[in-house]
Structures are given as structure tokens and as C-alpha cells.
Image (spheres, coloured by chain):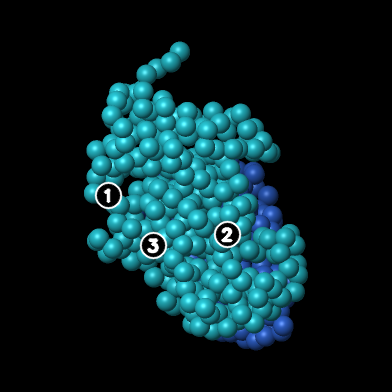
Amino acid sequence: MLRSIKVVLNGVERTVDVEDHWTLLWLLREKLKLKGTKHGCDRGDCGICTVLVNNTPVKSCLVLAPEVNGAEILTIEGLAKEGSLAPIQKSFIEHSALQCGICTAAFVLTGHWLLQQGDGVDRKRVAEAIDGILCRCTGYRQIIEAIVDAARKK
Amino acid sequence: MLPKFLYHAPETIHEALELLNKYGREAKLLAGGTDLVVDLRERKTRPKAVIDIKRIKELNVLKYEPGRGLVIGATVTYHQILEYEPVRKKYPVLWEAVKTVADEILRMRATLVGNICTASPAADTAPALLVYDAVVETASKNGGRKIPIENFFTGVKKTVLEEGEMVVSVTLPEPPADAKGTYLKAMRVWSEDLALVGVAALVADGGKDVRLAYASVAPTPVRARKAEKVFREDGDIREKIEKAVELAVASVSPISDVRASKEYRLHLVKTFTRNALNRLLGVEAVVVA
């Protein structure tokens, strides 16, 4: 069934028509053409489709589009403000925390969420938080360092 | 793409039951969605309606009261359980089991009640619920039921739930005062894997009240009551542990699958049971070369 839902997407209030059986991932990529969110395993294992819903990391392949009615959604496209990168994005660049890039949006958004969780963002905490996102290039070291360093500079 | 279905988001249990009644077996309840959405995508289920229960506020209760125990509502996530201090203090077996499930991002979404309703033989929370004698509370148009967790699972992905019936909460009674316990789980990789074997052990009443329960070694999660009885009798503690280990092995019936062989699973049941009991009963392990 086609229905209208209201969301605040990357800071902008929007009304969108969605089909009941669409996933949030489908809504973002195919309907709204926000291709920064990546499509991976489609079963919640790889984590590369992670976005923030009500400021909480969520694997968007496992969420139905109508479920997010009334929610705030942040995708990688909404992180930079007025042309200037968010601290977590700068840190990923400084630490060369990516290679092929397919998992990067998910790690950056999860890192961004962690930075807002208060103190204690050390290697152990970061490793725990990013446990559900796979990267097959970097071996995770640079990713962890980028997030820990961004937390230190906060 | 998922197959088509109608999405409903009731705001009360009453509305949810109306919908369940209307669609019967053609409805699926949605909580965290970490099992259901995967099953929908793989066409393992083709419901006409998906009923999202996350907007029903009364289902998100998570409350411990001394003497009365712990109530976990149907939409309470693993993350909520891990963050709730009384769980860590009073129900450590459950806390440890929940900590092993998937990863932090999924744990902020997936629910304990969803886990038991999926009724996988590998359900990680089931052995913990079994050793705490949990009771599943349901609602339906004909009234609700209180079902001991030991009677809840009837087969692989099957439960005693009837058409039109939904789980409202799970209650864990107050554990014995001196209860200690642990959950041991074998996986091929840490996170993102199901249990090859999961063992929950609880020891109370000065070592006389011992409870053992297992995941991934039978069509349903199982409690090894025969092995538990050994500790009600007098005798040498080491001998009792060995006897219990043998009885535990006799009470499970694992299969070989892509994740582990039957033989390996039986071996894990033995060593995990022995290690857990040695530790909880304060027996020093004998090193066997």
C-alpha cells in the first residue's frame, strides 16, 4: 500500500510516499537517490547500510520504510554543514581510514554517533561499537584510530 | 526487494489483537525485525500483513522488583537489557547470554521476545530463561496464558503460540539468594554467528540447586534435569560433576550441519558443562594431558 510518511531527513522536514514493503535502504537509495548509503548483504550482517535513525545507528536493510514515520534520519549526505566537513569526516581523511570506500559511510556515521555519547571513547569502546560493520580493506586499525582521535580532539 | 504485504502499526494491545484476529495465520508480528525482515526477503514467510508492535508503549516495560522478579516486555531490546543494572546484578546468566548476541548495532534493535518467538534451536537467550524458570505471558481475544518457558518451544522454529495469540512479556522470578551462574557459547567467529553450542549454568542453595540448559544441540533449547538431580544427593563433588556431565550429554541430540559436526557439539557440551560446574562449584580443574 502506498502511504505518506513524515521524516526529518538530514535536517530537512519531508513528506514522502512509500510502499509498505519497502525497506529504509530502498527508500533512501532508489526513491530519494541518496546513494551514499550502500547496499551490501541485505541481511544485517555486513553493516554497510548503517544510518542514524533518531540518533541511533541502524542497519537500514532491516528496517521497513513505514517504520520510520516521524523519525529523524541522518545519512552520510547530511553530515557536512554548509560545505564544511564534520570533525569525524576530517579525522577519517587525516588517518587514511578507508580504501575502497564501500563501508566508509557506515563507519563515519557510527563514529559520529559515538562522539556524541560522552567520554570514554577509547580503542576498546570503538572496537565494540563498530563490531557489526565489516571492512575488507583496512584491517580496521585506521578506522579505530580515526574515531578515537576525533573523540580526543573534541 | 521484499514481497508485498500490508503494514500496520497499532498503538494498543487491543488493536494488535484485533488485527491478529482479522488476518489469522496470514499476519506476522514485527518487533526488531532482525529475523522477520530477513525471512521476508528470503521468501521463508509470505504474510498478508506485518503488524509492527513497537508503537505499543505498554510492551516496552523493563522492570525488576525485589521478590517479584524481572519483567521484560515484548519490544524491549537487547541493548536495553544490557544497560539495566538489575539484570547484570541479579540475572548474570541472561546478561552474559545477551552480550554474545550479534553486534551492538543489532542489539539496539533486536528483542528478547522476538528471539524466543523465532524459536531457533540456537536462540541464545533461551538457555538463560530456562535456568531462571522464566514464564512467558501472552494475550489473545480469549484471554492470556502464562506458559513456563520449558513448555514454550515445541520444535525447530515452532512454539505453543496459537493463532491470534501474542507474547506480551517474559517474567523471570527472583533467583535464589546465593545464585551464581554463567553462559558459555562457542562460535566460529566472534559476533555475527549463531551458537555452535550454548550452555547456561546456575548454582544455588550451597551447591544443591544446580540448573543446566543448552542451545543448538536439540530441535529446541533444552534443560538437562536428570543431570541437575545429581547434585541433590550427597557424595564427592568431583564424582557428581562427572556424572552430571555424562547425563547432560545423554539429554541432548545435536545434528551435524555447516557450522559444526555432531561429535564436536557433544564434545563441547562435555567440556563446557564441566568447566562451568567446576568454576561455579569452586572445584579446581584437574589438568588431563
Badge 3 and badge 2 in a common chain: yes
Kindly identify which residue carries mark 1: B176
Displayed quadrant of residue B25? bottom right
Q: Amino acid at mark 1?
A: Pro
Numbered disc 1: what chain? B
In the orientation shown, which residue stands out farthest toward the top? B289
Q: Can residue B231 be seen from the camera position used here?
A: yes
Q: Amino acid at mark 3?
A: Thr
Distance from the alpha carbon under mark 3 to that under mark 2: 17 Å
Q: Residues within 10 Å of mark 1 (few under 14, many from 20)?
A: some
Q: Are marks 2 and 1 on the same chain?
A: yes
Residue at (67% x, 85% y) in the render: A3
SS at badge 2: strand
Which of marks 1 and 2 precedes in the sequence? Answer: 2
Mark-to-mark CA distance, 1 and 3: 15 Å
Picture coordinates of residue B195 (x, y %)?
A: 55, 43
**Could you say where residue B285 lies in the image, as x and y percent from the top left?**
36, 23
Q: Which residue is mark 3?
A: B171
Image coords of residue A61 (percent x, y): 65, 63
Q: Identify residue for label 2.
A: B159
- Quadrant that contains the N terminus of chain B: bottom right
Chain letter for the part of the structure drawn in blue: A
Pick whichever, A42 or A144, lies toward us: A42
> Residue shown at 63%/33% (left/top)?
B262
Q: Position of residue B68 (x, y in %)?
A: 28, 63
Helix, strand or loop under label 3:
strand
